[in-house]
Amino acid sequence: MHHATQAYNDTAKATLTSRDLEAHLLLKAAAKLQAIKDEWTRAEAELPDVLLYNRKLWTVFASAVTDETSELPVSVRQNIANLGIFIFNRTVELSFAPTPEKLTALIDINRNVAAGLRGQD
């Protein structure tokens, strides 16, 4: 059964478009952040690892949109870069003064960008 599940997951990953993959990764990060927020007392110790995951994800996005070869419109590139800066600043803030309320913005941004990537409102 495990092999069948793994084969399905591998096939699903191979058939995802880059936008779908990006949306999936953003939603995965949002879910991890939401789980910590929902179970703060139990899960706060997991925060550094999840923040690192989210920061790495946004580092890739920010690098891609600031690359001169990016085909995205300048306004979209600027918006994503600005969101990246906010994410990085909030991550530093959470590293020094963690509270569950500060996670809300990160969760919302990830979910909204993922929805945009999937063509949803």
Image (cartoon, rainbow, N blue to C red):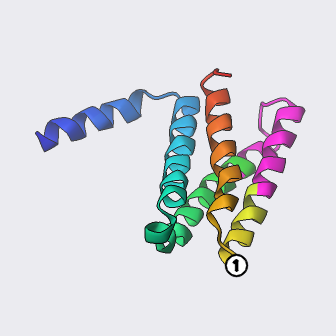
Disc 1 secondary structure class: helix
Residue 64 located left or right of residue 73: left
Q: Which residue is mark 1?
A: 96
Q: Position of residue 26 (x, y in %)?
A: 57, 43
The answer to whether residue 24 of the structure is visible from this angle is yes
Foreground: 34 or 65? 34
Which image quadrant for residue 116?
Answer: top right
- Residue occupying the point 58% across, 65% down: 52
The answer to whether residue 67 of the structure is visible from this angle is no
Q: Position of residue 104 (x, y in %)?
A: 66, 52
User: Does residue 100 show up magenta in the picture?
Assistant: no
The magenta stretch is 63-86
Residue 107 located left or right of residue 41: right
- Please tell me whether the stretch drawn in magenta is mainly helix, strand or loop: helix
- Residue occupying the point 56% across, 36% down: 23
Please tell me whether residue 37 is drawn above or below residue 14 in the rendered image.
below
- Residue occupying the point 77% across, 43% down: 65
- Identify the amino acid type marked 1: Phe
Please tell me whether residue 74 is drawn above or below residue 61 in the rendered image.
above
Which part of the image, by quadrant, shows the C terminus? Answer: top right
Question: 10 Å neighbourhood of mark 1: few (<14), some, or many (≥20)?
Answer: few
Q: Residue furthest bottom?
A: 96
Which part of the image, by quadrant, shows the N terminus? Answer: top left
Residue 20 located left or right of residue 106: left
Please tell me whether residue 28 is drawn above or below residue 4 in the rendered image.
below
Q: Position of residue 36 (x, y in %)?
A: 50, 60
Q: How many marks?
A: 1
- Residue occupying the point 67% across, 35% down: 112
Which image quadrant for residue 110?
Answer: top right
